[in-house]
Image: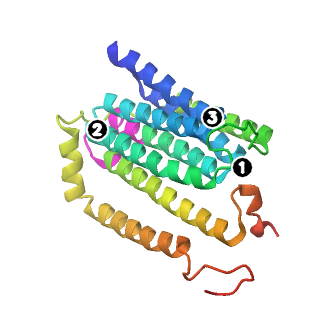
Amino acid sequence: MTLELFLLLAAALFAVGLYGALSQQSVVMVMMGLEVMVAGVIVAAAAFWYFLAPDRPDGQVLVLVVVSAMTVEMAMGFAVVTLLFRASDADTTDAAAELRR
Amino acid sequence: MVPTVLFWLFAVVAVGSAVAVFRVDSMARATYALALSFVAVGASLLLLNLAYLGVVTILMMVMEMAVMAVFMIMFMMNPAGLMPMSMLHNQRAALVLSGGVFAALAAGALLVEWPERRGTVPDDPTRAAGDAVMGSKMLVMMGIGAVLFTTVVAALVLAAARSRYDRGPAGERP
């Protein structure tokens, strides 16, 4: 176990999540992609804490902040999707294109 | 030796099931694959002596997947995967972009000279985290509390019918 291995795992998770967030049409799947990206950030933050500065708790607190960011992202994402669906029957990202005009 | 083997096991499961999320037909399977991926991520945190944070990650993700399943049934056209259909757009650009991001991040991870490790892992990292949350990092946690409360209010205002941002078919206010 080395820092580099954990960072590679984090990079792989981040890239897979990015692919999902960019390529999926269904908003639920886009949300899943974002979750995978945040999981990569969690792994990287924990590895930085363990391998670089385990004597201070900052890394652990950073993980807590990222976990909270994940819940906020889920809640706000689904709230916006619910609103969009009620307002214009949009359940895919392509159908919600008002800002493009 | 054993931690290394476990790390590779968790890493393969985490990345493999994350890939499976976007490959399987059935959305129910995608949700379970994502839950499995997060359990592996939480387990890899356990390898770093982060018992509390690892378990919190696993518990939170299991709950989130339960919530996600409800929304999946609400919004997916094909929740059970009985009608195979492609729900992708812009796949080639997404592949190129995410491959490039992985290459850049991996190059950074391998090429940067990371500093020497400072200090040692405390005997009880959970206690260290608890002391920090109740002491030097309390302001961070109070900030998170305010953000979470704002999220509750904002999500309700956005999502509830007959509220500030709801519009009828002709754009009229409720």
Q: Earlier in the sequence, mark 1 or mark 2?
A: 1
Q: Position of residue B150 (x, y in %)?
A: 42, 72
Whether label 2 touches label 3, CB < 8 Å: no
Image x and y of residue B20, in percent = 60, 31
The image position of residue B153, as x and y in percent, is 44, 74
Q: Is residue A31 left or right of residue A95?
A: left
At label 3, the amino acid type is: Phe
Report the residue at 63% width, 49% height from top: A30
Separation of marks 1 and 2 at Cα, in angstroms: 41 Å
The residue indicated by pointer 2 is A54
Q: Callout 2, which amino acid?
A: Pro
Numbered disc 1: secondary structure: loop
Residue under the point 52% across and 74% down: B160
Q: Which residue is mark 1?
A: A25
Circle 3 residues within 10 Å: few <14, some 14–19, many ≥20: many
x, y percent for residue B127: 18, 44
> Are callouts 1 and 3 both on one chain?
no
Image depth: mark 2 or mark 3 in front: 3
Residue at image point 71% right, 56% down: A93
Look at label 1 and name its amino acid.
Gln
Q: Chain of mark 2?
A: A
Q: Is residue A54 a member of the stretch shown in magenta?
A: yes
User: Mark 3 belongs to which subunit?
Assistant: B
Image-based side of A99 in relation to B20, left or right: right
Question: Disc count in the image?
Answer: 3
Disc 2 and disc 3 on one polypeptide chain? no
What residue range appears in magenta?
Answer: A45-59
Q: Main secondary structure of the magenta part?
A: helix
Task: Confirm whether the magenta stretch covers residue B40.
Answer: no
Give the spatial CA distance, label 1 vs label 3: 22 Å
